[in-house]
Image (spheres, coloured by chain):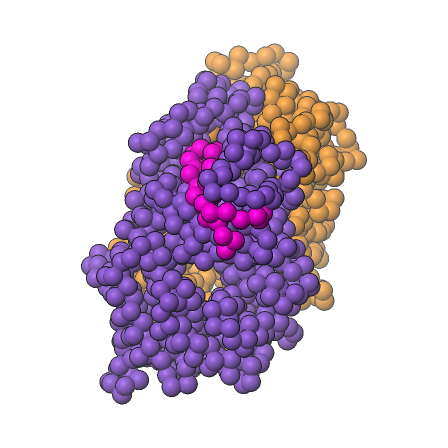
Chain colours: A purple, B orange
Amino acid sequence: MKSNRISVQSFHADDGFVGRVQKLVRDEVLPYQYKILNDALPDVEKSHAIENIRLAAKKLKGGDVKPEEFYGMVFQDSDVAKWIEAAAYALAAGENPELEKAVDEVIALYGASQHEDGYVNSYFTVKAPDRMWTNMREAHELYCAGHMMEAAVAYYEVTGKRSLLDIMAKNADCIYEQFMHNNTRACPGHPEAELALMRLWRATGNEKYKALAKHFIDVRGEAPNYFAEEEANRNWNVWQHTVELDTDYTQSTLPVREQKDAVGHAVRAVYLYTGMADVAKETDDAALLAACRRLWESITKRRMYVTGGIGSTFMGEAFTVDYDLPNDTVYAETCASIGLMFFAKKLLENEHRGEYGDVMERAFYNTVLAGMQLDGKRFFYVNPLEVVPGVSGKAVTHAQDLPTRPQWYACACCPPNVARIVSSFGAYAYSESEDTFFIDLYAGGTVQTQKGIALTCKTDFPHGGSAVYTVSGAAETTIAVRIPAWSEQTVLTVNGEAIDLSAVTRDGYAYITRAWRDGDKLALTLDMTPHLVYASAKIAADSGKACVQRGALVYCAEEVDNGEILPLYIREDAQPRALDFEPETLGGIVPVVVDGCRVQDSGALYSTEKPRFVEKEIRLIPYYTWANRGENQMRVWLPVR
Amino acid sequence: MKSNRISVQSFHADDGFVGRVQKLVRDEVLPYQYKILNDALPDVEKSHAIENIRLAAKKLKGGDVKPEEFYGMVFQDSDVAKWIEAAAYALAAGENPELEKAVDEVIALYGASQHEDGYVNSYFTVKAPDRMWTNMREAHELYCAGHMMEAAVAYYEVTGKRSLLDIMAKNADCIYEQFMHNNTRACPGHPEAELALMRLWRATGNEKYKALAKHFIDVRGEAPNYFAEEEANRNWNVWQHTVELDTDYTQSTLPVREQKDAVGHAVRAVYLYTGMADVAKETDDAALLAACRRLWESITKRRMYVTGGIGSTFMGEAFTVDYDLPNDTVYAETCASIGLMFFAKKLLENEHRGEYGDVMERAFYNTVLAGMQLDGKRFFYVNPLEVVPGVSGKAVTHAQDLPTRPQWYACACCPPNVARIVSSFGAYAYSESEDTFFIDLYAGGTVQTQKGIALTCKTDFPHGGSAVYTVSGAAETTIAVRIPAWSEQTVLTVNGEAIDLSAVTRDGYAYITRAWRDGDKLALTLDMTPHLVYASAKIAADSGKACVQRGALVYCAEEVDNGEILPLYIREDAQPRALDFEPETLGGIVPVVVDGCRVQDSGALYSTEKPRFVEKEIRLIPYYTWANRGENQMRVWLPVR
């Protein structure tokens, strides 16, 4: 059964967990991001993103602008786009005239940088106008355009303003001409335009945009490889040395309908798969949907971290092979887990299966949230599951696995991505088909359905397991709520009466069809017993280890709580125990303790001395709260003894 | 107490373990190597090494030789040098007129390629004569020269022929002029000349060569960094893109006497440290010796694998940081463990400490021997401690960690290095000071001392723990035998009477001073009980694991014997048990079994299902014999349960 996500503005968070992290993004991240885009922070790596657009507009007007005045990466425009998009979602939460004015100004500037034919991209306008459209593999033109399309759609949906939408529709028309008529074999190096064009199609109703998205997906990976051909006919590259063409990196080794394994750059992969799933849904393409399911299986059954992280190596920021999931040299880019959420959501819109929602939840509550410091001021690009200061961030093999979150980056894609997904959380938490309203994630606040009812949710999730939905209005309809696989004993009641879950649950969702009345209460109580989790023996990195999960949260052990982590073991038959909620700790958490032991130091590098252990209760915290108390050792997976 | 190694020809192996591997090298490796050097094998990567020298000689005579006729790396000459050196040692084992004739022919050719001023190097003579001496960091000129010096010394010592010695003395004079007068800040990018010049000094008595070796060591790492300066003044590089100058890679971040940690390219490091230890010994340089000891500690206490492998990553083929010792993405280049043996031996020559000999033994009997297939036909460049087909050799992070030994390489340094050290084993097994004859390694065969006695050793080492030395001749002198730290209960007898080891052992050596008479028997019985070995908790990769060692041999588990290895655990209180010697298995081994268990597959990537185990006795084989029965999973370190 297909469904659609709800609009962002249909959901208004309360001041629970989701509402508070949304507020953090509005209060901290968006303003900070805006300052960065305007180069208003002296101690931070220059962005120059808005200035670049200003320069492009000036040049189009005939102003004297030198190429070297551009500063930043080929994809610098996308930082602006993501900020606009997140700002749009923030506006959905409440009026903010100052923010809206800032957005309108940037949009006007951007519009002024648009060529007559609809082309818009500050890098190529300022620096290399003779090179437009000639380096699909590296130039990120469609990537930037796609992000701005998403921003345009978001802004239009929330504010009703068409300013950016019209700019991007004109841009999309230009792109359509270029790639449906002039250069029909090309597709984007970095997928993004596919999913963005689908959003643009929905917002404008223009079928060309859907056709173009489908086209890009259809031509990708056809032989001979387009990127290789293009490379041979071109004498310049974005990067200083020729990056050897790795067709897996760009998911272009095979046509997408033939692809079996999730390979290559992880963010590119999941953005592509998201676009594929959207096109599959909207064109009823069974072969394409089957490919999506296969790629989903490849990721979630063989190539994903317990924290919902994906991407095993910094080399290519990529997937590697099945079961290769090292904890210390992992990549697990924040953006990649966000993209995994996109992909999960799109699959849900094709067919509601609990596993899609479970993974979307796992990715959000672990890696995505870990990507942001609790105060919203610093971000992880890379999310390790094991950190040892002195090795992590230092050894050449661990250079990207930092023990503490750095500030902004030259390649600053992750913070704005966190901002956008947090701000649009409602669109991930709910979806709707003609006859069913789906609860995919649990979020405190009120959501308007299109069925004549609204639901107000009060929940202590993720630290607690209770979510109570109170109905406003009345309608005879179906509400479907995801029952996570990790909840071993779930209770669902309507107005206090327990539902027989075995009778109503299909593929991870409990379907309650009734004549809902104003004041009805649907109460979900999830099993928040903490459990030891074991990895498949096929994952060499996790041999002999276990980790702890409670609810959706994967836990970890930090040195600050336990002393050195490397000598710690979990006792084989231990039962992890949840302590009381600690509101003052790390923004408010439920710590978990588990019986363990510490091995005594033999003093030698290698020794035949039988190890001696001293009992130790290990204190664990949710993984997303790690690295907020300075540099220290951390492990998600602990050896068992 | 200082000592000197014995000459290679003083030792003649019997047909025990050492003798048989020496014979394998003589019968298989040297002839194969010779064919390769002459491009006589159609299916194998071309070497062109001897042809290059022929071209250089032709060019010097005024022949028409085009630069592009040279084929191979800048260090191609060194392959020839190492073959000559190994051939020399092979000749020590017995006459071989055909081999000697081949060597003489190559030497004559090489001599014909020597310039008037003594310079000799086929790459630069043929391809780039205007670039001689301008790229110390990359060009390997002194590396090639050093290896040929070692070959010259070996050939002279074994055969008495001065042909190559004279060529290389003239070359050394040329190098002396260049670097003691013209370019006095330079030192070799790849250390080798330092240790080679010391050998040349000993063979010729020319003090200039010792002074030059010392000079190269003294100037290395002085500020400003010479390689950086040279780079700035040069517009070409050996490698296609400019390799960013990593001063750690070339051990030139600090002057050597200030160095504390073993860093950079592992082979370069240990070749340098070997040269340092030799110069320290021969110039009584206490600060230099102190640095050698610090670097030894850095390696053996914090940066060495249990198999005596060194070098944690393919990135730079290098050391990384303390305790970073991954088992699957390890480098552990065969050449590096050979270099570690060089370093250990040189330290022994400065002062006899058991730990030097123990590490030399560990490196040889594990990583060095593992580098060669049992039939001598294939070699490992990289020696992993964990291999999973499908990941190893395949994932980009594991690309160098192959599950089976490949054939020859474009960079073929390891096989000839294995050939040289195996063929000169006697020089590592024994050393001699004025009053003491040292037994550093146990090798079946007869050794001539300079004290009027010879020792004939009969031993079943490494599979057995018995070594009986029978004296021929008579002398009042001291025989010192290494008592390995791994032998928990050692018995040493003279003519059947037990020696009180506590009374005679100093720093890992038992010193027996007596009037030795013809027929006296010194019998060593080592403790061959297999033991579980545990790694320091600081080595994150080995958390919760153990490996097995018996005698000098580290053991491993292969899939061919046990089924899939990844699900296997050793039982916590297990006592490994040696089976009987199996002469037909893997060239003859003592297998070890240990109680273990296999975890059942939950079927899921991550599961809260408590793991179920089935008891399983694990069959282990010596690590050096792994990968001789096809591609399969292998682990040295197994989790404990």
On screen, A157 above or below A571? Answer: below
Taking depth in this image into account, of A160 and B521 the one nearest to the observer is A160
Which residue in the rendered view is the most extreme toward the right? B584
Q: Position of residue B290 (x, y in %)?
A: 33, 36
Q: Residue furthest bottom?
A: A62
Q: Quadrant of residue B441?
A: top right
**Relative to A159, residue B63 above or below:** below
Please identify the quadrant where the C terminus of chain B is shown: top right
Q: Residue at x 53, y 12 (%)?
A: B500
Q: Any magenta on residue A468?
A: yes
Residue B585 against residue A280 in the figure, above or below: above
Observer-nearest of A428 and B469: A428
Q: Is residue B446 left or right of residue B538?
A: right
Is residue B453 visible to the viewer in this orientation of the structure? Answer: no
What is the total number of numbered labels drawn onto the structure image?
Answer: 0
Q: Residue at x 29, y 75 (%)?
A: A109
Residue B386 percent location from the top left of the image:
60, 41
Depth check: B67 or B325 in front? B325
- Residue range (magenta): A450-478
Please indicate whether residue B239 sits to the left or right of residue B579 in the image. Answer: left
Q: Quadrant of the N terminus of chain B?
A: top left
Left-right relation of B396 to A461: right
Tell me which residue sits at (46%, 61%) in the image.
B140
| Residue B525 in magenta stretch | no
Can you tell which quarter of the image residue B604 is in? top right
Image coordinates of residue A249 in percent, x first then y, are 54, 63
Residue A163 seen in render: yes
x and y percentages locating residue B301 in the rendered image: 43, 33
Q: Residue at x 52, y 28 (%)?
A: A529
The chief SS type of the magenta part is strand
Q: Which quadrant of the view contains residue B530?
A: top right
